[in-house]
């Protein structure tokens, strides 16, 4: 494992493995580093990824001129705040040409130049897969927002630099590749915004097409919804227009009817003056000529039709003869096929009969063999039974002895029943007293002294920690000073509510911890925990705190601040409700934050946002950073709320709200209740002793009579066996002899000749039937040939007949139309002739001069005067009842035209909506399951569902290794109408930290801050494991985590980054490591520890104490 240090004034960094000294103006390299040259002696990375082999920063932020030589796998960058750790990730971002906005720090790269300098640069050496190293240099100028770039000394535009590094798979705007400190906070906040979390995951691990498809799906569904709404509005408008058109149509019909009535009345008046004779004579003569011409044409058509009909009859006769011949052969063919099928079925039945006869013969022989063997075995059994019968001797008075023994046993059973009833009554009384005593003892156990109840609670809830407590208590003489712990036993709280507040404030891990007052005791207790040093110690892994300087940090809140707090419903310091030894209070205040915790009324929780935004509660610390009076939290019966500020940028307030949780570890007692329960216990113990004595007496009486009953029962059994043995044996012998006689009478082979005859008969009939089927088959073939020949002859006759029939129908139709026309003409001629005769007189007196239109109108009116007058009267009555009506023809035509346009638009919209639906379905299938060709969604991503499955595998496996349960799911949202709501598709992270819990959604209001931070970071690590990247940069991932969770995350990152396989180069930046964590990591990695490089960033003259790593 290589160790390097950062720049600054004179720095001494001591390690149990190596020691180096650096001075102003640069870093002095070790002998090995000087011999290895600029690349640091590192082997070039093998495999398919590029890695960073060298980073040089000159006049960049706090660095004057420093060169960093990272290892090919894990690079752990350590240092206190302000030492320049994050400068490394800034240099990587700027040096590779990426936008400084990713750092959320400065607007332009010129602001990264060190104070007092005008220019600076970042130079990064990259190894290429299978090629030479490439050096990218970014030159920064104080007054310029953009940098100037070179690649291997050649001037290059930033766009070309970005294109080159992206071609190597480097993409720093991806959270899986580059995760600065601000992005960690922003990403953790997404735990309560699962839809935004999904989009970030798509950007981070999905192919570029995935997020584009998601955006397109959201746009398409929104447009589709708008289109459907417009479509429905259009349909409603169409219905309104149709109703309006119907109204216009009715008005138009009424207007036309009025005009028609006025015209008809006028024509009727004219027709009374018409001289019908003149008009009727002309029409009569013209129609007569038409009738003569039509009669001649009808005669010609009728002769032609008769000739065609004779030809059709001849063709029909020839076709019928051909069909009759074919029908005879088809009937024969069908009959032969049916006979052949019946013969096949008969053949199968006869084959079955033959096989059945053979099987019956074989079965008869097997039955005979079995019967002979049964008879032989039965005869041997009779011989054995007879020999055994002769051994039994029965006394003559056996029955009298049995009756006497039975009576004696019955009397003994009656006495036993009475004694057992007495025993059951005594046992019932004893059990009742015992149960009540156990309940009283259980209640006493709950209300024992506070100290005893705390110890008992510890023993029940955490046996391993109780063993550690007992061991430390028994071995206090080994320590130089008293060792306190667990802290939960050392604290006294006045009521359960404050106990819950204190437990939530300091955390369950601190309450389980021990406190040592000096360095000797601290190391001794650590040695006890290490199985390598003390195999017999029951202490496995416990939390140990140093007392430090032993000073209790009491709350320091001014009266003015208290005034603001009380106005917001905050009542007291939680510190005032806790009583403990000075050493315990020192740890609780210095390391548990008890001095910064407040408690208040529920109204403060209800308006927590307004309380946190109160500017009078926000102040600046000595280092210029913002802080909040309620940074340690305010506790109420509803929950806790607090506020912190981000370390960089605009120092954004980060509020945190958690629900109220009852105390699980701290206990509050009640001594008076214990005294009452103790008195009741003494009374019950006296009753229990009396019941126990009565029960013992009853059991002794039952025990005395049981041997007597057993002896009498044995005597009765012996007498019955002596009587029944010989009688039972005689019965067995007689039954067996009857069975033998019955079996000898049986003759299974009696039916064999019949079965043999059946077999021979079936075989002979099979041969006969086969010969007959052969003849039928030959006949069938001949008939098929004949039918085919008939079909060939029949087709030409069908075609000829069809042509003639079509011709006949065509000519017949023409003839029918002509005859109808002739009849119509004859009627008109007769009618006109009558009109001429009737109207001849009126022609001279009343006929006016009429135009053609009037004559046609008059012709449609009734021909008689009475009918005409009646028609005029009816028209006048109808006209008088209709009133006035304007002409709405143009309105009607305009409305009809608009209806046609809307109907056409509706048809077009239906097609467009259908296209929208199909497009959404195709795009959804591709987004969720990938494309079949794998071009847009290459493996392993494929589709969103597969990406979530890969993340879930990594996430759940990591949680399982920690003894917890974790799961990642895709929530496919639906609208109220059941349609896909792509905008609200989301990722759900489910976690379970305790066996008694169910899986719960990750939420800052449900899980603790440490659990939320742990889950978020393990989710990010899971994202990184399914993406390939040349290198990854992660800055301060341990924010908000305790030592346990910090170690779990570091273990996971280190193990993945230092695997022997081709893994990504990793830069892990952190201000601290939990005590002993680095040694634990090295021990776990073993031979793989060479894959980790540790860099120390130290500024100033402070010296790290040797042996701490």
Image: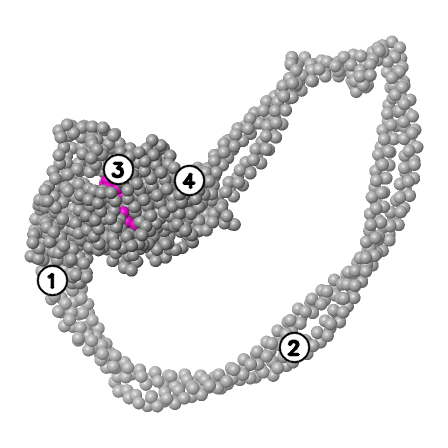
Q: Is residue 437 above or below residue 836?
A: below
User: Magenta includes 78?
Assistant: yes
Mark whose residue sits in front, 1 or 2: 2
Mark 1 lies on residue: 692
**Quadrant showing the N terminus:** bottom left
Element at label 3: loop
Which mark identifies residue 647?
3
Residues packed near mark 1 inside 10 Å, few (<14), some (14 to 19) or many (20 plus): some
Q: CA distance from mark 1 to mark 4?
A: 103 Å
- Residue indicated by mark 4: 155
Q: Sequence order check: which comes first, mark 4 or mark 2?
A: 4
The overriding secondary structure of the stretch rendered in magenta is loop
Q: CA distance from mark 4 to mark 3?
A: 37 Å
Residue 853 visible to an observer of this rendering: yes
Q: Few, some or many C-alpha atoms within 10 Å of disc 4 (few <14, some 14-19, many ≥20)?
A: few
- Residue under numbered circle 2: 762
The magenta segment: 75-85
């Amino acid at each position: 494992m290589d160790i390097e240090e950062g720049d600054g004034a004179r720095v001494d960094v001591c390690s149990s493995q190596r020691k180096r000294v650096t001075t102003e103006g640069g870093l002095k390299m070790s002998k090995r580093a000087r011999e290895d040259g600029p690349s640091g002696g590192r082997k070039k990375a093998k495999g398919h990824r590029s890695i960073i082999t060298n980073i040089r920063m000159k006049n960049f932020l706090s660095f004057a001129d420093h060169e960093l030589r990272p290892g090919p796998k894990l690079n752990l960058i350590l240092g206190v705040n302000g030492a320049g750790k994050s400068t490394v990730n800034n240099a990587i971002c700027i040096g590779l040409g990426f936008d400084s906005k990713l750092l959320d720090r400065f607007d332009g790269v010129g602001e990264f130049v060190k104070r007092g300098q005008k220019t600076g640069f970042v130079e990064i050496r990259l190894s290429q897969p299978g090629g030479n190293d490439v050096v990218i240099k970014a030159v920064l100028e104080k007054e310029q927002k953009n940098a100037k770039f070179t690649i291997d000394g050649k001037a290059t535009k930033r766009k070309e630099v970005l294109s080159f590094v992206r071609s190597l798979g480097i993409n720093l705007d991806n959270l899986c590749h580059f995760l600065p400190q601000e992005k960690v906070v922003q990403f953790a906040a997404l735990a309560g915004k699962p839809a935004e979390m999904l989009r970030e995951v798509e950007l981070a691990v999905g192919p570029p097409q995935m997020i584009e498809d998601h955006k397109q799906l959201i746009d398409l569904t929104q447009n589709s919804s708008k289109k459907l709404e417009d479509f429905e509005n259009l349909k409603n408008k169409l219905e309104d227009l149709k109703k309006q058109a119907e109204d216009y149509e009715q008005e138009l019909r009424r207007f036309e009817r009025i005009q028609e009535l006025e015209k008809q009345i006028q024509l009727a008046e004219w027709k009374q003056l018409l001289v019908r004779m003149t008009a009727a004579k002309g029409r009569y003569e013209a129609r007569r000529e038409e009738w003569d011409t039509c009669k001649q044409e009808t005669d010609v058509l009728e002769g032609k039709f008769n000739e065609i009909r004779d030809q059709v009859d001849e063709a029909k006769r020839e076709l019928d003869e051909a069909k009759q011949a074919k029908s005879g052969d088809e009937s024969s063919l069908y009959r032969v096929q049916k006979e052949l099928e019946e013969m096949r079925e008969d053949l199968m039945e006869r084959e079955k009969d033959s096989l059945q006869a053979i099987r019956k013969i074989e079965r008869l022989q097997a039955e005979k063999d079995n019967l002979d063997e049964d008879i032989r075995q039965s005869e041997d059994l009779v011989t054995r039974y007879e020999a055994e019968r002769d051994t039994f001797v029965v006394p003559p008075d056996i029955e009298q002895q049995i009756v006497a023994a039975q009576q004696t046993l019955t009397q003994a059973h009656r006495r036993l029943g009475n004694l057992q009833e007495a025993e059951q009554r005594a046992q019932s009384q004893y059990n009742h007293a015992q149960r009540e005593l156990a309940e009283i003892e259980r209640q006493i156990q709950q209300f024992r002294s506070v100290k005893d109840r705390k110890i008992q609670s510890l023993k029940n809830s955490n046996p391993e920690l109780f063993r550690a407590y007992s061991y430390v208590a028994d071995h206090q003489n080994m320590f130089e000073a008293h060792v306190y712990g667990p802290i939960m036993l050392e604290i006294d709280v006045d009521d359960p509510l404050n106990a819950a507040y204190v437990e939530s404030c300091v955390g369950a891990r601190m309450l389980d911890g021990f406190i040592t007052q000096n360095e000797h005791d601290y190391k001794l207790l650590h040695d006890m925990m290490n199985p390598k040093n003390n195999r017999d110690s029951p202490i496995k892994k416990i939390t140990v705190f140093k007392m430090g300087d032993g000073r209790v940090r009491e709350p320091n809140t001014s009266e003015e601040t208290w005034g603001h707090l009380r106005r917001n419903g905050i009542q007291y310091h939680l510190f005032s409700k806790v009583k403990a030894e000075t050493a315990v209070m020192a740890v609780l205040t210095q390391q548990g934050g008890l001095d910064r915790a407040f408690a208040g009324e529920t109204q403060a929780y209800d308006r927590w946002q307004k309380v946190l935004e109160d500017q009078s509660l926000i102040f600046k610390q000595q280092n210029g950073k913002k802080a909040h009076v309620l940074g340690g939290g305010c506790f109420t019966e509803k929950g806790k709320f607090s506020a912190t500020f981000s370390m960089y940028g605009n120092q954004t307030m980060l509020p945190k709200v958690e629900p109220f949780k009852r105390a699980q570890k701290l206990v509050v007692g009640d001594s008076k209740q214990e005294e009452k329960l103790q008195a009741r216990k003494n009374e019950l113990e006296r009753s229990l002793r009396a019941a126990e004595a009565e029960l013992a007496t009853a059991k002794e009486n039952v025990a005395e009579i049981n041997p007597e009953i057993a002896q009498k029962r044995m005597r009765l059994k012996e007498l019955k066996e002596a009587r029944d043995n010989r009688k039972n044996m005689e019965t067995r012998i007689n039954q067996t002899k009857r069975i033998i006689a019955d079996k000898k009478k049986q003759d299974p082979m009696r039916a064999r000749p019949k079965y043999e005859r059946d077999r021979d008969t079936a075989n002979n009939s099979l041969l006969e039937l086969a010969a007959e089927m052969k003849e039928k088959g030959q006949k069938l073939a001949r008939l098929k040939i004949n039918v085919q020949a008939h079909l060939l002859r029949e087709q030409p006759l069908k075609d000829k007949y069809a042509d003639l029939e079509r011709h006949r129908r065509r000519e017949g139709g023409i003839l029918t139309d002509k005859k109808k026309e002739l009849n119509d003409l004859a009627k008109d001629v007769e009618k006109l002739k009558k009109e001429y005769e009737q109207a001849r007189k009126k022609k001279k007196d009343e006929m006016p001069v009429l135009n053609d239109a009037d004559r046609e109108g008059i012709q449609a009116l009734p021909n008689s005067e009475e009918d005409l007058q009646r028609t005029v009267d009816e028209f006048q009555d109808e006209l008088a009842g209709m009133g006035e009506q304007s002409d709405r023809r143009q309105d009607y035509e305009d409305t009809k035209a608009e209806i046609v346009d809307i109907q056409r638009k509706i048809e077009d919209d239906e097609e467009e909506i259908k296209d929208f639906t199909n497009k959404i379905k195709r795009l959804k299938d591709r987004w969720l399951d990938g494309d079949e060709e794998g071009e847009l969604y290459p493996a392993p991503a494929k589709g969103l569902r597969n990406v979530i499955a890969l993340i879930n595998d990594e996430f759940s496996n990591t949680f399982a290794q920690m003894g917890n349960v974790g799961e990642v799911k895709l929530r496919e949202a639906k609208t109220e109408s059941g349609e896909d709501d792509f905008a609200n598709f989301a990722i759900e992270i489910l976690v379970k930290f305790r066996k008694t819990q169910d899986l719960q959604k990750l939420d800052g209001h449900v899980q603790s801050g440490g659990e939320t931070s742990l889950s978020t970071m393990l989710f990010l690590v899971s994202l990184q494991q399914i993406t390939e990247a040349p290198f990854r940069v992660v800055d301060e991932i341990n924010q908000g985590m305790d030592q346990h969770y910090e170690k779990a995350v570091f273990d996971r990152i280190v193990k993945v980054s230092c695997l022997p396989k081709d893994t990504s180069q990793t830069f892990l930046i952190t201000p601290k490591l939990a005590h002993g964590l680095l040694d634990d990591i090295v021990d776990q990695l073993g031979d793989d520890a060479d894959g980790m490089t540790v860099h120390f960033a130290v500024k100033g003259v402070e010296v790290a104490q040797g042996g701490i790593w």
